Amino acid sequence: MPSDGPPTHLIRLADLGPDRVRDVLDLAARLKGRPGRGELAGKTAGMLFFRGSLRTRASFEAAVNQLGGQTLNLTAMSDFWDLEERDGSVMDGRAPEHVKDAAAVLSRYVDLLAIRPAQQGLSWDVDRQDREIQAWSRHATVPVINMESAQRHPLQGLADLMTMREQLGKLDGKRLAVTWVHSPEPATVGVVHSLLHAALQEGMEVRVAHPPGYELDGGVIAEVEELAQDTGGSLSTGLALEDAVEGAQIVYARSWQSLEDYGNKTLGASHRSRLTDWKIDEKLMELGDDAKLMHAMPIRRNVEVSDAILDGPRSLVYQQAENRLHSQKALLLTLLR
């Protein structure tokens, strides 16, 4: 790709930068509501899933197909095997192939690789490094897109930003409440990390509510606080639910793992069992400024969010999910056309 073109890889939103993110979202708005015109005819996107997916897989495949391209889908455990990502390793263990070799070969078959990497789930110090997706980006010679690593979910971040722009228009100074909610199976923190970057890049006032022990990654917090200084945004963390939601235009609900309990499922479950009152209902939403609900899904109804909110006029979750399709189409055109 030319040196003055878009970056080869999208591992995190910062790889695009604020101006290119806005360009992608402006293009997504133009693409929404019109059929594809075969812009990616003759192009093939390889999709590799080391973990399960519903919206990401469906929306990404639909985006490629609607633009006239083709997808090659591979799912770990059923279509291929474990891969070694450490450079210089002596491969006498379980993995029969190195990412270096898989990436080199697949780069000769496809025009782009979109990857949802696995997570060990044993140590946050290990998983936070995102070594698998970083290995793919080092060794592939085609663009690599991160379809949710432990630390980042840039595709969700683009769709979230698109949805908030549609709802609120100009985002600087608008108030976003990011609220931890109880779930028996919490998600990773990647969605929230990318959301913070997206919102603070646009100068929003972001308030994060979570119980003690559910603090986000310190390195990411330092990164987005520095970003907020440049954009005029602000970030408050560790708030109570009511304090975060008061006056907010958007309430973004999400369950995430405690990084303190990371790798200890028994301790994590015990901790969460005492936090079942952390959920979103109408009484809480009334504290906002005509607040609308967002959630990356899947949602445990009446555990994380009440039916009344999800099925009522406050909910943006289906619009938000649809915008995965349009924002990803715009991203694909940006990277490949």
Image (cartoon, helix red, strand yellow):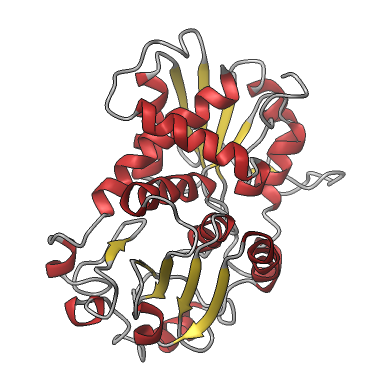
Name which residue lies at 35% across and 54% down: 168
Furthest residue in direction right, as rendered: 88
Name which residue lies at 63% across and 59% down: 231
The x, y position of residue 197, in whole percent, is 58, 58
The x, y position of residue 320, in whole percent, is 32, 49
The x, y position of residue 120, in whole percent, is 60, 60
Q: How many marks?
A: 0
Of 335 and 92, the residue lying toward us:
335
Name which residue lies at 49% across and 42% down: 77
| Quadrant, the C terminus | top right
Q: In this orientation, does residue 312 appear?
A: yes
Name which residue lies at 50% across and 69% down: 205
State whether residue 162 is above or below residue 224. Answer: above
On the rendered structure, is 88 left or right of 47? Answer: right
Furthest residue in direction bottom, as rendered: 274
State whether residue 252 is above or below residue 68. Answer: below
| Quadrant, the N terminus | top right
Of 95 and 85, the residue lying toward us:
85
On the rendered structure, is 254 left or right of 110? Answer: left
State whether residue 61 is above or below residue 138. Answer: above
State whether residue 317 is above or below residue 143. Answer: below
Of 270 and 27, the residue lying toward us:
27
Q: Which quarter of the picture shows residue 58?
A: top left
On the rendered structure, is 93 left or right of 207? Answer: right
Of 186 and 220, the residue lying toward us:
220
Q: In this orientation, does residue 97 appear?
A: no
The x, y position of residue 163, in whole percent, is 36, 49
